[in-house]
Amino acid sequence: MGSAFIVAWLSASLRLAGPVLLAALGETFAEQSGVLNVGIEGTILLGALASFLASYYTGMIWLALLVALLIGVAANLLLAWMYVSLRASQVVAGLVFNVLALGVASTVYRWALGNSALPESIAMFHPLHLGALSNLPLIGPVLFSQTLLFYLTIALAFVAHFVLFRTNFGLALRSSGENPATADSAGISVSRMRYAGTLISGAAAGMAGGYLVLAQVGIFRETIVSGQGFIALGIVIFGRWNPLKAAVAAIVFGACDALQLSLQIFGTHIPPQLLLALPYIVTILAISGLFGGKAVQPAALMTPYVKE
Amino acid sequence: MQHSLEMRNIVKRFPGVLANDHANLTIHAGEIHALLGENGAGKSTLMQILYGFYVMDSGEILIDGERVHLGSPKDAIALGIGMVHQEFMLVRRFSVVENTVLGLREGGGPLLDLKRASEKLKDLSHRHGLDLDPSVEVGSLPVGVQQRVEIVKLLYRDARLLILDEPTAVLTPQEKDRLFAILRKLRENGRSVVIVTHKLKEVMELADRVTVMRDGKVVATRTIGSASEQELTQLMVGREVNLHAEKSSRPPGAPVLKVEELRVGDKTGREKVRGVSFEIRAGEILGIAGVDGNGQSELAEALLHLREIKGGRVLLNGADVTALSAAKHRRMGMCYIPADRRHLGSVTEMSVADNAILGQQRKYARGWFRDTCAARNFADGLVARFGVRRASIDSPAGKLSGGNLQKLILGREIMSGPAALIVEQPTRGLDVGAVEAVWKELLQAREQGKAILLISAELEELLNLADRIAVMFEGRIVGTFDAAGASMEEIGSMMAGGASGEIGGTALTTAMQIPEARNGETV
Amino acid sequence: MAKLFERRLTPLDSPLAILTTTSAAFLTAMLVTSFLFLRYGASPLQAYAALFHEPFGTLRGFGYSLVRASPLALVALGTIVSWRSGFAYLGFEGCFVIGAAATAWLALLGAPGAQPGPMPSFLFFPLAILFGFVAAGIWAALVGIVRARFGGNEVLISLMSNYVAIFILQYLVSGPMRAPGSLPETRLLPRATWLPFILPGTRAHAGILIAIAAAILAWMLLRKVTLGYELIVTGFNPFAARYAGIDVPRRLELAAFFAGGLGGLAGMVEVLGSQHRVMDGISGGMGFVGIVVALLARLNPVAVIPTALLYGGMSVGADAMQRHADIPSSITFILESLAVLLVLAFDALRYYRLNPAFWRSAPPAAAEELK
């Protein structure tokens, strides 16, 4: 196992990490505002379909990405209304929404394509070649040959961190998730903050779906989203509700995923599933309270706020 | 505000209670004004209206002669009114400066300029003697310092009128002195302070003028120099006693419940019960008088070991039950009727019958299976005996009115045949008929030889039911009276921390805490 | 200005009110879905006829409905037992596969050539039920312990644990339990381990009987057994439960065990009744659809069997509808989930009523001033 292996592995790690990180960044905003948006799994699916169709019909990848974003926002308006205004159980509404999204996505997909054959390819994002940077040994292929969307996602991680911790909006949002009564008494509309958090997670999840289709898989399948949303939830926790740490967490998750693929090729005796399960096990231990993990989550997460 | 703020004819109703009944209040610039009254007097409600948290039903508020509209805290803040609540409005995870700028949109832009805010904060802190470090996480600060953060938040928004709701409830004596110094400085600054309190001594020590509220009405406004403590107590508690209960006099029997030097802390580690001792005999009702928040709830829960006990002992019929589980207490004969009948005392979603056997569920069973027949019979009997009306035993207990629910809970506990009953605020929120019914049951239990600890903020209730009354203030028992000869003023005065005993004067307080040594003599 | 809707003091709680809102929600969902049918040029009535005819109007289809309903019902029962005890468990996908793997392992012990060889049916099936239940029950109880003793958030932990279970399954079917060959699945289980067929002319198997028995037991647990009483009190009011002598941590762990066990039975029923082998993806999302069934059944064990039958039937009918009317089967997902979302929305109505004050001409404040 030489450097070729390491290069392939690290490159794949980053590649796989991209979409889930994007979704996790949005979900961080939702959870920091006090909403556990389980519905991002379904939203990613809807975004994937939307971007696929948009790219198929128009051939414009950036437009397709935008469409995915807008679909994500629209779908999460319904969720936000249920979470915040109806104060429905967040977990219930999110889970059921995922089933609904699956139904809608499958139906619309068949609708749009009818009986025609699947397209051979659609317009996609391709890995960049940044001249001299890409030719650097080792780090060249790993860091500088990713798709544009990857770099965009990393940039968004920094933006998200800045917005959350260095702006008035971020402070107000976080207070809604930590202590809504205090936020209310400071004149902040907790409802508005939670709507914002949910819609941001919707936008990011929609885009993540677009990322999957436009920069990775290249086609739409009904099974294209199989747990990435839940993985994003894990990344948010693993990253301690902090966008930059989430980026690291996503890469760790991606690395385990990529490692098991690579190991299969090389035929070792470590069960690949152990590596795949490792990030989840670590996340579980982190929030189990065995090591005092409870203190880190936003204090009012999942607690609906009722004004007296 | 330059000169004065006036609240005129404020009326505020909540379902079932008239919280503010044409209340009038005037605050001058540059004064410390105390708002004095017991639980339920309406003072907190009035201030919530002033701060824009509640909207009044009718009345008007004028600042410097002009009518103003206070629809939300934002309006109040804009007019220079600020409030420090009893439960601090702080985000524990944020730093001092982050808590201070929360909700403000400074510097125009969306960016947080914590650096500039910290400068301003340090300056304010220095000028007013608050001694705050902007970057520290609030959750790690002691309570007294957290309160100063609340104050700096108000000063940062240039509040001219600061309202503090029961500010010394959470403070040590030293922190209290420090707070008072800060408040006096604010007064020198030309700002006004309203301090909502039930503690008479503090009013005398700190305020310029005092307004007394009782039962939703403003009873009087006095200048401190011209009013005596007795007069203020009289205004605070004096009322006609409307209800009378028939209580037989009987010599109490053997001691049943004995509490020795009980110490109980709360979540933050502060002591809420500071060495309380008393004894109750069979067939005797010991009333605990006191305004909410002086340790009574913590005492009640600790007696049942539903709360951690830091020190002291609880003895039931001679057996040490201090460390035993709540369920064990029950089985050994000590029952509890909590103040919150809907959320703690019963399971409102379950049926009346299911609630009737709560705690006894193992008894109404044959092996693993529930003996629903026997349970229903028991419930039927209970409902009939205790007069629980207007719901079948199969309908959810939550549908019962407050009075009927209380009768159900009371019946359930009494029917389990305890030797001792701990009862907390049993008639809060009940109508006259229900109050009389509950009183009748408690007196009957007394006749049956039970030892009853009755914690109540209603003096009328204590005077009617109790044989002896102990007053609790700041976690200690500061006086014990024979109910027969007791006067409302004296008790009320002690509830307000006033005349009859120096708090902290150990000799006098210790003597009061062991009534057995004095056989219940009036102190 | 009075609001149009004012909040009631207590929500309408009667079974009639709940049934009304649930039915109204389902019917509304059907109405909305009809518009989708129109797009395909099919009249909604025809489409619904096709949807419901096959699973409920034909014997063969009904048999398939029973097959699909069994695991859904079991997961739904698990949801009910745990959620009503105050334990918000979502790890049924994981319990499903754990139960499936455990029973398959037991079944393979009896395969020709394996040790100890085939065992008689009267021994095998009870043992299989026990295995499936206990293996998955322990799996879920681990999460219960973390919640009861350390205060961990069971919602997030159980969601994560699904993945760990799925990976365990993937490992088993591509390694120790794999059939000879390259496919990641076990060999076909011996015929003797198949759940007996119960309806001639159909593929309906005894799994539905297990589900019905479980529903009866769950109902008895919650209503007739003291343990169930204690679980329910714990779910509603842990403080009152403590005072009532209930050991809250132990009850939570027990609720977790039962819930997991029921999820494991779902896996067992699917393996021994329908699939007869274990492969990756055997759960097919039933661990989540079962939760949806429980929600529509309003967390009531009695209503689970008909509701599971409805949803099982709809999935059968959806395939038929696709074959005959060329309408995508995925439309039923929309119908199923929309119904529950509408239930949640309509539920809000039980908390409100029309405010008579809204219709009075003068606002109350003005009336005061006229005095």
Image (tube, rainbow, N blue to C red):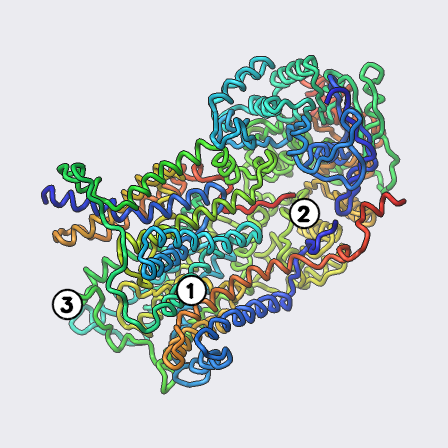
Classify 10 Å Cα crowding around label 2: few (below 14), some (14-19), many (20 and above).
Answer: many
**Mark 2 to mark 1 CA distance (whole Å):** 47 Å
- Which structural element holds mark 2? loop
Give residue A306's quadrant in the image.
top right
Type of the residue with mark 1: Val
For the C terminus of chain C, the quadrant is: top right
Above or below C51: residue C252: above
Disc nearest the viewer among 2 and 1: 1
Chain of the residue under label 2: B
Type of the residue with mark 3: Gly
Residue situated in front as seen by the camera: A244 or B232: A244
Classify 10 Å Cα crowding around label 3: few (below 14), some (14-19), many (20 and above).
Answer: few
- Which structural element holds mark 1? helix
**Mark 1 to mark 3 CA distance (whole Å):** 38 Å
Type of the residue with mark 2: Arg
Above or below B116: residue B379: below
Disc nearest the viewer among 2 and 3: 3
Q: Residue furthest left?
A: A2
What residue does disc 3 label? C181
Residue B341 image label: 2
> What percent of the width, then of the height, locates residue B116?
49, 21
Give residue B450's quadrant in the image.
top right
Residue drawn at x 39%, y 59% is C92
What residue does disc 1 label? A104
Residue B497 appears left or right of C87? right
Above or below A29: residue C55: below
